[in-house]
Image (cartoon, helix red, strand yellow):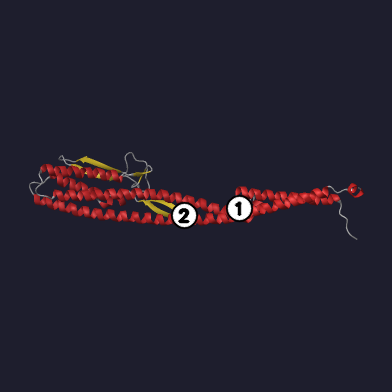
Amino acid sequence: MPIRIGLKTQYDRMLNHLNRLTTELSDLQAQAASGIKFDKPSDAPVALVNTLNYRKAIEEIDRYQSSITESRGYLEAIDKAFDGLENIVTRAKELAIQGANDTLNDQDRLALAREVWNLLEEAVAVANSRHNGRYIFAGNRPTGYENGPFSLVKEALPGGEELVKVVYEGGREDLFQGYGPGQEILVGRNGEEAVSKSEIFESLIGLYKTLSNNNQVDPKKENENIQLQLERLDRVLNKLTDQHADVGARLDHLELKENLYADLKVSIQENISRTQDVDLLEVATQIRAKEVAYQSALAATAKVMQLSLVNYLS
């Protein structure tokens, strides 16, 4: 025996169908507007979790890239400082060679001595260079100084002599900075190791004293002293060059790491796009199909709504 379906049941079915079409159409329109496949966790829980993980990974990469940028800035400042120190030593060698000339008079030698003193003061200033308010040759204690970790000191000695020296009061440990999971890089060596042990200050002071003494009694002895200072300056330059090369190697490493992070970030962003971004052309097609289905269902519902016992009796 066939089952008879009442008009109310038909109405309810049609209304439910219209409501479902309306909801689906609204969801598709929301996707088209936002460009994202899901609006709430229940829409696509797995995709949402994956997207959140990808975004967390990008946040970590951003932190590491920021750390690399700061580290590179610090190392680039040190790189420039070593350029300055090497130029100072090179100029001091030129002055030493001039000072070994027997034809120079007293005033010429004193003029050379004054320039060497200026180079010494400049070397101390370069050693006290800063990056973003931090002294680059102060090791693990880059702040907290009135004039910097290096000081040019003069002390009076008995007999009217004067002791000239450069004192280092910075950190005794090196400065490291993280740039990846469990990874740190040396960004700033302590000034004792990076600068003082090159003997740049002692060499400049020695050359200054030799030229200032202007040994006219024994010019041969003075030339020998100048040659000793030249050899010392050569050793200083070699030590500074080695330190400089190490800084360059660390900069190259950071550049490589920075490029790797940039590539990884692009890859993760592509994964996010595949996970959450909608295909606008496909969504537009689905919206058009839903609109047609909705209009058809609406027309069919309108016809059914007109049916009643009166229609059959008329």
Please name the residue shown 67% across and 50% down the image.
27
**Residue 39, horizontal then vertical, whole percent:** 64, 49
SS at mark 2 in the image:
helix
> Is 129 in front, or is 12?
12
Q: CA distance from mark 1 to mark 2?
A: 28 Å
Q: Quadrant of the N terminus?
A: bottom right
Can residue 30 be seen by looking at this rendering?
A: yes
* Mark 2 burial class by Cα count in 10 Å: few <14, some 14-19, many 20+: some
| Amino acid type, label 1 | Leu
Q: In percent of the image, x 82 and y 50: which residue is there? A: 304
Furthest residue toward left:
217
Q: Compared to 152, does 187 lie above or below?
A: below
* Residue 78, disc: none
Q: Is residue 39 visible?
A: no
The crowding category of the residue bearing disc 1, from other C-alpha atoms within 10 Å (few below 14, some 14 to 19, many at least 20), is: some
The residue labelled by disc 1 is 280
Q: Residue at x 42, y 51 (%)?
A: 68
The residue located at (16%, 51%) in the rendering is 97
Looking at the image, the residue that sits furthest to the bottom is 1
Give residue 119's position: percent from left, percent from top. 23, 45
Residue type, numbered disc 2: Ala
Disc 1 + disc 2, Cβ < 8 Å: no
Q: Could you tell me residue 156's position as x and y percent?
A: 20, 39
Tell me which numbered mark, 1 or 2, is placed earlier along the sequence. Answer: 2
Report which residue position mark 2 lands on.
262
- Residue 181 appears left or right of 162: right
